[in-house]
Image (cartoon, rainbow, N blue to C red):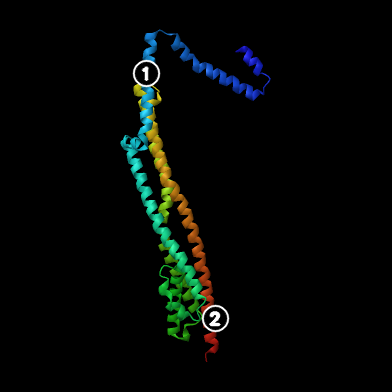
Amino acid sequence: MTVLLAALRPLTPSLYGALVAAAVLLLGLSAPATSLAQGDDDDSAPAVAAASTVEYDLGSGADEGAWALISHADPVVKSVMFVLLLFSLLSWAIIVQRWLLIHRAWQQSAEFLDSFWQTNSLEAAHNDLERFPDSPVAQAFDAGYRELRKLQAAGPGSGPGGVDNVSRALRRSASQSLTRLERWIPFLASCGSAAPFIGLFGTVWGILLAFQKIGTSGTTSIAEVGPFIAEALVATAVGLFAAIPAVLFFNYFASRLKVLAAEINHFSYDFLNLVERHQRGRRQGGP
């Protein structure tokens, strides 16, 4: 051993230290095997039998899979995983439903804007609104057009304040449409922030059971405490499974709704400009 270390000494200090540490570790691991080999046959036989028994237990536990860990888990850990599974199902239901609704809103809003700027009159555009029932831009136009018709029915005495009435109608419709689209989306944020901590609670509980098992049995064998630690890690995995999609889709929906709100505002400004020009033309053409 001394000759080997002297031969390795010209190497770099870090590599030399790593090789020395590895050699010492190998010698430490081989010492129990040497002591067992030097014992009598009666002492070595039980040791071999015990070693084979532990290896069999580990192999059978590995074959059981994650479902067996869940089925044999502590009631508290099962409750945590049930809550997380419920969170995950609700999150995916909201994700699918909101994605379909927001996708239709985007598609119909784009089609409405193309149709609106190609029409020759506001009345023709309003008659074509039945094609866009899920478009928030079309709904804002409907509210503004109805308010404009009320002002026209009131006569020219409505004054310049009529534009403000149309503006308020547009803002109210935009707020209602965005509120309808944002419904249940905050639950995704709550799930994304709370699910990891709920899973962490199950993990901590499983580790506490593992330490309790160590204290009662007086052994630190992985075959004794391994199942409890595995149950704890499964709870953490379920929490992440529920939280990660919720956070990703919450950010996606938030960005899409932000752009859609900007599109509604841009159309509202353009529509107000049309209304103001229309009102100015009526005042100038009046008696």
- Pointer 2: what residue? 277
Which label sits on residue 12?
none
Can you say whether 108 is above or below 191 in the image? below
Of residues 138 and 179, the one nearer the viewer is 138
Which quarter of the rendering shows the N terminus?
top right
Of residues 38 and 92, the one nearer the viewer is 38
Give residue 82's position: percent from left, percent from top: 33, 43
Give residue 71's position: percent from left, percent from top: 31, 37
**Separation of residues labelled 1 and 2 (CA atoms):** 94 Å
Q: Residue at x 39, y 15 (%)?
A: 47
Mark 1 crowd level (few <14, some 14–19, many ≥20, 10 Å Cα): few
Q: Residue at x 54, y 85 (%)?
A: 281
Instruction: Kindly indicate the quadrant of the structure image that contains residue 40.
Output: top left
Can you say whether 149 is above or below 48 in the image? below
Give residue 230's position: percent from left, percent from top: 39, 33
Residue 115 seen: yes
Instruction: Kindly indicate the quadrant of the structure image that contains residue 44.
Output: top left
SS class of the residue under badge 1?
A: helix
Give residue 6's position: percent from left, percent from top: 65, 15
- Pointer 1: what residue? 50
At label 1, the amino acid type is Ala
Q: Residue at x 57, y 20 (%)?
A: 21
Question: Which one is earlier in the sequence, the residue at label 1 or at label 2?
Answer: 1
Residue farthest along the bottom direction in this orientation: 287
